[in-house]
Image (spheres, rainbow, N blue to C red):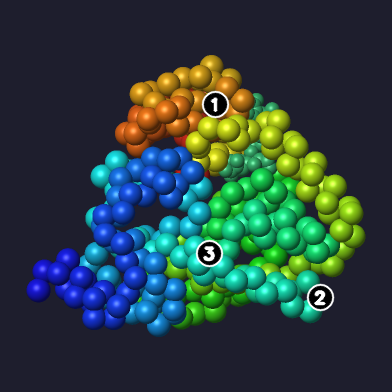
Amino acid sequence: MPAVAAFEAFLRERSVEALRDHPLSNLTTFRIGGPARWLVRATDEERLAGTLAAARECDLPVRVLGGGSNLLVGDPGVDGAVFHLPSLSRVDFGIGGTVDVQGGASLPRLVKETTRRGLAGLQCLTGVPGSVAGALVMNAGGRHGEIGRTVRWVDVLETDGRRARLTREEAGFRYRGSDLRDRLVLGARLDLEPSDPAALQSSYGAILADKKATQPMGRPNAGCVFKNPPGDRAGRMIDACGLKGAREGGAVVSDLHANFILNGGRALASDVLRLIDRIRGTVRARLGTVLELEILVW
Ligand code: EPU
C-alpha cells in the first residue's frame, strides 16, 4: 500500500484526530507558510505514540508545531504529519517551587502565573511568545536567563513513539538549542524558587517595558532571526550594515531591531528567505561573520 494510503488507513482505524491540508500560516506568528498534509491533534499519549510510529513506518516527514513563534514554514507547506497539541496544556503547582507543565501550555501565561504566585525563575522569559514545548526545544531566553536552567526533567516521545524521561543534562540545553529538537515534548518538571511576589512583579514589568521599547511587537514576525555570534550581537551587526528597512517582496527588516524580519503584508516564505540570504551575504562581505539562523525553517 502506498505510504499516504497506509497512513490514512491508520488514522481511520485508530480514530486519530487529524485535519487534512490544513493551512499553517495561521498557526505561526509570522503568518506565513503553506498547508500541512495532516495536522495531528490527538492528545492521548497512546494514540500520539502510535501515530508517530506509523508516520515513521510510512516514511512520511514528521514535524512538531509548538506556538509557531520561532518558525518559518515554507510556501509549499509540509507534505507529512504535523503534530499540534495546544490542548495538552495542564499546569500543576506542587510543593515549594515545583511546577509540572505540559508541552502545549502557553509560555506567556505560565510566566505571568508563576510571577503572580511569587515563584522565581521564568521572569527572564517575559515577553517571549510560544508554547512551553517550543521554549524547551529552543532553550528560549534572553539577556536575563534561559528556561533550561529551571528544568528537573523533560518527558518526551521519541520519533519511534517510545516514551522517555530526560534529565536536564540529558536534554542538552545550550544557547538557543537543546537535544530535544526531533522529539515530541509532552511536558516537564520545573524547579522554581519561592520568592517575593512584589519584587518579581516589578522585574516582570521592567523586562516587558524594555522589550516593548526595543523589539517590534506590532507586526507579524518570528522573533530574532539569527543567533548572536560569539562576542557580538546579530542585531547590532545587521544595523551597522545599513540593512534596517531592507525589503524583499513583503518581507522587511525591522527599523526598531535589525534582527527581526517583519511580514509587512502578504509576505511569502520565499521573500523572507531571499531577505535572509541578502542579510547573510552583506554581513559576511562587510564584517566577515557568517550569521547562523535562530529560527527554524520547514
Ligand atoms: N542593537 C543595535 N541595533 C539593532 C538592534 C540591537 O545596535 O537594530 C544593539 C543594541 O543597542 C544592544 C545590542 O545590539 O547594544 C543587543 O541588543 P538587545 O539588547 O536587543 O539584545 P539581542 O542580543 O539583540 C537577545 C536575544 C533576544 C532577547 C533579547 C533580550 C538572541 C539572538 N536574541 O537579543 O531574543 O529578547 O536578548 O533579552 O539571543 C529571540 O530569541 O527571538 C529574541 C528576540
Quarter for ligand 1? top right
Cα distance in 3D space between marks 3 and 2: 23 Å
User: Mark 1: is the Cβ under 8 angstroms from ligand 1?
Assistant: yes
Q: Position of residue 250 (x, y in %)?
A: 39, 26
Q: Which residue is mark 3?
A: 104
Q: In the picture provided, is 295 more to the left or to the right than 215?
A: left
Say which label, 2 or 1, has the lower sequence index.
2
185 shown above or below 75: below
Q: Which residue is mark 2?
A: 96
What's the residue type where badge 1 is placed? Answer: Ser
What's the residue type where badge 3 is placed? Answer: Gly
Q: Quadrant of residue 92?
A: bottom right
Q: Quadrant of residue 96?
A: bottom right
Cα distance in 3D space between marks 3 and 1: 29 Å
Taking the spot 49% from the left edge, 80% from the top edge, the residue there is: 164
What's the residue type where badge 2 is placed? Answer: Gly
Taking the spot 50% from the left edge, 67% from the top edge, the residue there is: 87
Q: Which residue is mark 1?
A: 254
Q: Nearer the viewer, mark 3 or mark 1?
A: 3
Q: What secondary structure is marked by label 2?
A: loop
116 shown above or below 230: below
Of 229 and 192, the residue lying toward us:
192
Of 67 and 288, the residue lying toward us:
67
Taking the spot 59% from the left edge, 58% from the top edge, the residue there is: 106
Q: In the picture provided, is 198 more to the left or to the right than 100?
A: right
135 shown above or below 271: below
Cα distance in 3D space between marks 2 and 1: 42 Å
Q: Position of residue 240 (x, y in %)?
A: 58, 20
Q: What secondary structure is marked by label 3?
A: loop
